[in-house]
Each structure stands twice: as structure tokens, then as C-alpha cells.
Image (cartoon, rainbow, N blue to C red):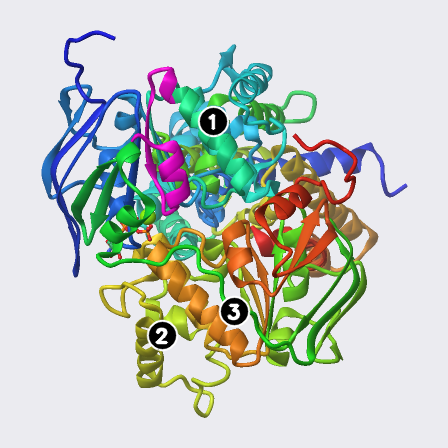
Amino acid sequence: MFFDSDLLMSALRALTPILLAALGGALCERAGVFNIGLEGMMLMGCFTSVATSWFTGSAWLGVLAAALAAAAYSLILAVGAVTLRGDAVVLGIAMNLLAVGLTSFLLRTVFGVQGTFDDPSLAGLPLIGGFTPLAYLAFVAVAVAAVMLSRSVWGLRLRGVGEAPDAAATLGVSPAKYKYAAVLISGVLCGLAGAQLALGNVTLFSENMTAGRGWIAVVAVMLGRAAPVGVLLAALLFGLAEAAGFRLQGVGLPQQATDAAPYVVTLVALFLSTARRRRRTANSPSGATT
Amino acid sequence: MTPQPVDPAVELRGITKRFPGTLANDSVDLTVQRGEIHALMGENGAGKSTLMSILYGMERADAGSIRIDGREVTFGDPSAAMAAGLGMVHQSFKLFDSLTVAENVVYAAEPRRFGLVDRAAARRRVRELAEEHGLAVDPDARVGELPVGLRQRVEILKLLHRGARTLILDEPTAVLTPAEADALFAVLKSLAAQGRTVILVTHKLREVLEGSDNVTVLRDGRVVARLVTAETSADEIAAAMTGRAVELDRVHAPGTPGDVVLDVRDLTTDAVHDVGITVHAGEIVGIAGVAGNGQSELIEALAGLRPVASGQVSLKGRDITHASATERRAQGLAYVPEDRHAVGTAPAASVAENLAMGHHRTSLSSKGLLPPASVRAHAGRLIERFGIKAANPEVPASALSGGNLQKLLIGRELAHEAPLLLVEQPTRGVDIGAIQNIHDQIVAYRDAGHAVLLVSAELSEIRGLADRVLVMYEGRVTATYTKDEADERALGLAMAGGAVAPTEAVD
Ligand SMILES: Nc1ncnc2c1ncn2[C@@H]1O[C@H](COP(=O)(O)OP(=O)(O)OP(=O)(O)O)[C@@H](O)[C@H]1O
Ligand SMILES: [Mg+2]
């Protein structure tokens, strides 16, 4: 049987990093900051978690350090796009490129290896019922984000800031403050995503190990309309695709083809959702009138 | 009641503000007593909005002082002004379209429960305020889906929710029908009677005369007149504003209709049902109606911005029912939309560029390029012809005052010389001198043999310009009048639905 609980388990494992990063991206989107630096922030999280876990012997310190490092890294976007009013897309791309170079460089200088660092004594995250605590945390984060966004005072103000910053400003709400908060939280979440990837899904660091998951998270934000539950569903789709890819490998399909599964799903999903949106705006007035 | 002197609610002294190329406020003094409705008038670009922005902490004055209730203040931002009891409804609304009415009203002053927004309380609050002040609006509606008139109510509810003691309204009735404006003034008067203060920026003499206690007139950034409303007249205010005598509420001579240009049959789309209209060359057809009765939807459908559910639209005999907006323009349709900010202009682009838009494919293009010299010359001609007040054609459109932006839009669309002009609220927010100019231009356009379909909430405008008047009510054309039949009473009755059920008592 192709669809069974194993497939679902591995889908859930695959979706955790994407989900964490996409939640961060969704918050930024709601605050009016287009964050495509998720990939880079996640990669910083991967490296920091492995390095910290290695030197302290504690995976948990690794997680903490990853969250802090990625949050610090996210300041590039916050300062660049919010304070200096730079282009968020350019900044995000720069962050992604810089993260690849920086982590590869650090891998060489800190661990003296190229490509991959792994060691049997590298402490990974414990598993509870087959999942890391971060996987559970990701689902809790979805619920918290959903409630915060739709019900809390903070969430209301954040949504307002994202929609009409000048209107928020005239009511005494500082758009910059909320945008910074959203970007920093996305940094923390991407750090956790990176730790999950490097100390949970596997226990190693290899160059560019995020392999586009941050980009998939960006797509999940779009597909999920930047709503936490929507993002969860989109991430689930990609998780299933990745897990199914593994499974197909077992059936004998070449690895290059199966590895591509999540990306193919991404493309198809993007295509379908744009087509749908096109049709809707063509048929409805709201796009043209307001 | 008490003889002791009360400090004025607002006292501005020597306010001066210079923008590059413009002295927007030149040593302006303004005193507003508590409990009064004070009108601030002046032509487009006279500096009214700038003065109010300074009072509200959105702009910083180059010189001058502000006292609120006798205490000198400096507001670094609007929230400081709000804390001092000021509240402002801006000329262009500051609302969150995707949020609900209740969310917009309580934003940044939310009722809370357990750290969350108490949505039930927010809704209740909106209902209470709405009821108390006659500003009915559904608390759960998305603001972006509301017609402009209702959005304004949300803006006012926002201030009332914050308990503002002094309300500043920048052209609040520009988007309202006379009946709605009367309702608004009833609200403002009751607020003033409660001891609140209202500063009203407006171009409408009628409401100033009926609704205000005092008038301050600005011209070119300076105060040119301080008048007591009870002792002044429309002519005196108009003369102070423009520096010359102005002929108010002219009725233009009728046109001579030729061939049918626009033929609409049984048109149905959202909020529009079975509408039939014909507009001839050399004719202005006016559509009157209370905002939100389908006029905007009808015009959008005609402009190609809203799909037609059924019915037929033809332009000069050619079927354009399903043509795109661009195709329609190419067939000879020009369009002045109601919302000049979101649809009509590009705020960040320069005045010259905004004037060139739409002409870039036709008259201005040369071998597929857009020679800067022709763009400049084109801009220069329109600025001159329509009296657009801009420091120079290179400033961004966002630096224009509200009325001047409107002139820009009208000028650009008229310059197409298209056989059919769709025009919505052409003089909203435009000063009386400029209204005359725009009306003259529209009439001249008609007399040159073009067809004009005019939507206006301003009865005097409809009556002054239109050769035929249709009244829309709940998405249908419920009455048609010739120029002579269209008196204020008949139109008012039809707009209130009286033409549908003549037996029903109307108010
Ligand atoms: N940000 C700005 N930059 C440059 N010039 C500006 C800016 N804001 C306003 N101005 C200029 O200052 C003058 C006064 O503008 P203001 O908006 O106060 O006029 P207004 O009296 O409110 O006119 P209206 O009735 O058309 O709204 C205008 O000439 C305008 O072009
Ligand atoms: Mg103004």
C-alpha cells in the first residue's frame, strides 16, 4: 500500500522545517514585508545548531543558538527594508546567497571539512513518539499564530500595519515596530526550522543543506494566503510530496526524479493558484475598484 | 452661561509652512472656540489641508505655535494630538480595507478581554455609537466592500470611539448626497451642542451657511477673511475665496443631441438591474442617486472594469458588451473615475507623467517612444487650460492638493476628445472657481459633439449640466426627467425611492 501511516509520518517529519519557516514568512507577509530570505535564515540556523550542539554537547543549546543566530541574521532584512526602505526582494536574495557562502566558509574554518560535517557523537534532538519536540512545537505555533493574528490586539494592529501603514501611523501605531517584530519572529522560527533540519531530520551539517526548503516555504505562504492554517495545509502538501518522493525511490525510480517531487508540486501548486486568482480578479470587481 | 473667559479649544498663531516651491501656509492665525462649528474655506491649494495636518501633528510647521484649551502644545505625531482630544477625518480616508468596520473603529483603542480583542464589545460599541449619532453601518462588513459614503461613517465612528473633543473634518461631505450631508450636519450640531468642537474644511457654501458658526477663509496660504456665518452671504465668502465675484449655481444652456453614441440595453451586473440608457452626441445625461444605488457599478461596467452579467452595451453602433477597458478606450471612451487616488492617478509619478497616461499610446507617442519634450508640452497645455496648481510639472502627483488632483484627472481625460466621456463626481473636492471651469469644459466638450454620461451626487451639478436626468434607486433607473422637469424636489423624491412607490410616504 502506497498511502499508509509510515508515509504520513515521514510527511509530517518533512513538513516541520517548511512549516516553521512558512509561519515566519506568513507573519512578515501580514505585516507588509515580503520575506524571501527564509532559506538563508534557515541555513544559518542549521549551521549554528550543529556547531553549538557539537561544542556544548547539548542539542537544546543548539536549538537556542540557532534561533538567536537566525533572528540576528534577520535584522539585515528588518534594518534594510524597514528602516532604510530598501527593496525586500533584493535583500532577501542577498541574504540567501550570503548564508550559503558564510556557512560553507565557517564549515571549513570551524570544522576544517568541506561539504559535510557529521559525527556519531554529534547530539541530535530526542524523539518523542517518532517526532522531535520541535515538530510538536510547530503545530502549537500554528495554533498560537492563528489566534494571535485573528484575535489578539497585537495581531489586529499587525494586520493593519501590513495593509495600510499610514493609516496605522495616524492612529499612533508604529508600523516599523510591528514590521521589526514580524521579521525577528520569522528569524526565530527559521532558526528553529534550521535546527529541526540539521538536528532532527538528520544529524549533520552539509553545505546548502536547506536545498530550497526556504523557497518552498515562501510558496507555502502564498498558497496558504499567509494564514497560519492555510500555510499548514500548504506545508502538508509539500511534506507529502517529499515523503512520496522517498517512497518512489524505493520503487526504483531514479533519485534525481524523486528528489524533484516537492519542487514539481511547488510549481504545479503555484501555477494553479495563480490561474485561479487570475480568473477571480477577471470576474470580480474588487480588484479593479478598490 | 458663565461670564468668565473660556480658553479657545484651538488657537493657532503665525503658522508658516513652506514646501519646495510653495508657501502653503503664511503666518496663519486661527481661533476656534469650544462648542462651535468653524468652517475653513479656500480654493484648491489654498493650504487648508496643510494647516490641519500641522494642527494634527502630521506635518511640522516652520514657524508658529499651537494652543489647545489654552495650553501650548507641540505634537510630534497624530497620536499626541489624539491624546490632547483632537480627531481628524482625512480628505483621503485612512482605513484598512480588509478589516471589518468594528476592527477599523477600535483599531489602536481596542476593548480587551484576556489580552485578546473583545470582538463582541467592539461590535456593541459600534452599534451604540452608530445608533446614538445616526451613523448606521454594519459592524461586520469589510470596509473595502463598503461604498465611499459608508466608509466615511466608519471614519467618524473612529473619532467618536476615541472620545475626541475636537473633530477636524477635511471635506467630509464631498462624498455624500445632500440628504446624507444633512444627516452629518445633524450629527455635528449635536456634537457641538454637547460642547465638542468641529473644524470643517469644505468647498460647499450651502453647508457652511447652514451648518457653521464662523468662517475663516484662506487664499494662497494667508487668512483673507474671518466671517461670522450669521452675518455673511454666499457671495461674500466666494468673493473672499477667489478674490473676484463668482456666479454661483449656473444652469447651462441645453445641447443639441445628434446620433446615438452609447446604447445600453437591459444591463445587469452586481447591484445593477436591467438598466437601459442612451446617450447622444452633443448630450449630457446625468445620473442622480444616493451613493450606493448602483451608479458606480454601472459606470464601472460601462468602463470595462466589471463584467456584465446580461444585457448589451454598444458604442457608436459597435457591440462592446464584453470588450476590455483598453479596447473600449481604443473605441473612443474616456473615463473619469470616482476614486481619483486608487484608480485615477499614480501618486508617485510626476504631474507630467500622470497627464500623459492614456495618451502615451496615441497622440504623444512617436515611433513607439515617448519624447520628453512632447510630454512636457502636453502637460503644460493641460495645466494652463485647467488651472492645475502645481509648483512645476515634475513634482509627484501626491504633492498636489485634493482639488488639483481632480483637475488633473479631468483635464487628462477630456484631452482624449473621445466620443463618449464617462465622468463620476467631476467636482468632488473642487473649489467653486474651479467647479465653474470644469463645468464649462464639460459643456464645451458636449457642444463639440461628444456624448457625456455624468454621475454626480451633487444635485446642483446634475441640474446645471444635464440635458436629461435619470435617477437610480436600488440598482434600477426609476425615473427620467428632461432638463426642465428636473427640479430639486422631484429628484430628491425619486432618489429616496419615491418614484418607485409614489403612494408611500417619504419622510
Ligand atoms: N507634500 C507636499 N509637497 C509639496 N507641496 C505640497 C505638499 N503638500 C501640499 N503641497 C502644496 O501646498 C499647497 C497647499 O496644499 P493643501 O493640500 O494644503 O491645499 P488645500 O487647501 O487643502 O486644497 P484642496 O482644497 O484642493 O484640498 C498646494 O499648492 C500643494 O501643492
Ligand atoms: Mg485639501
Q: Earlier in the sequence, mark 1 or mark 2?
A: 1
Sort mark 2 into few (<14), some (14-19) or many (20+) by Cα contacts within 10 Å: many
Asked whether residue B195 is drawn in magenta, I would say yes
Cα distance, mark 1 to mark 3? 35 Å
Chain under callout 2: B
Residue B439 location (% of width, % of height): 45, 64
- What's the mark number on residue A196? none
Cα distance, mark 2 to mark 3? 25 Å
Q: Earlier in the sequence, mark 1 or mark 3?
A: 1
Chain under callout 1: B
> Disc 2 marks which amino acid?
Leu
Give the quadrant of residue B79: top left
- Marks 2, 3: nearer the viewer: 3
> Disc 1 marks which amino acid?
Ala
| Residue that badge 3 annotates | B253
Left or right position of A282 against B412? right
| Residue that badge 2 annotates | B382
Quadrant the N terminus of chain A occupies: top right
- Marks 1, 3: nearer the viewer: 3
- Secondary structure category for the residue under label 2: helix
Left or right position of B504 against B331? right
Most extreme residue toward the top is: B2
- What's the mark number on residue B186? 1
- Secondary structure category for the residue under label 1: helix
Q: Earlier in the sequence, mark 2 or mark 3?
A: 3
**Mark 3 near ligand 1 (CB under 8 Å)?**
no
Magenta segment, which residues?
A: B192-213
Q: Is residue B209 visible in the rendered structure shown here?
A: yes
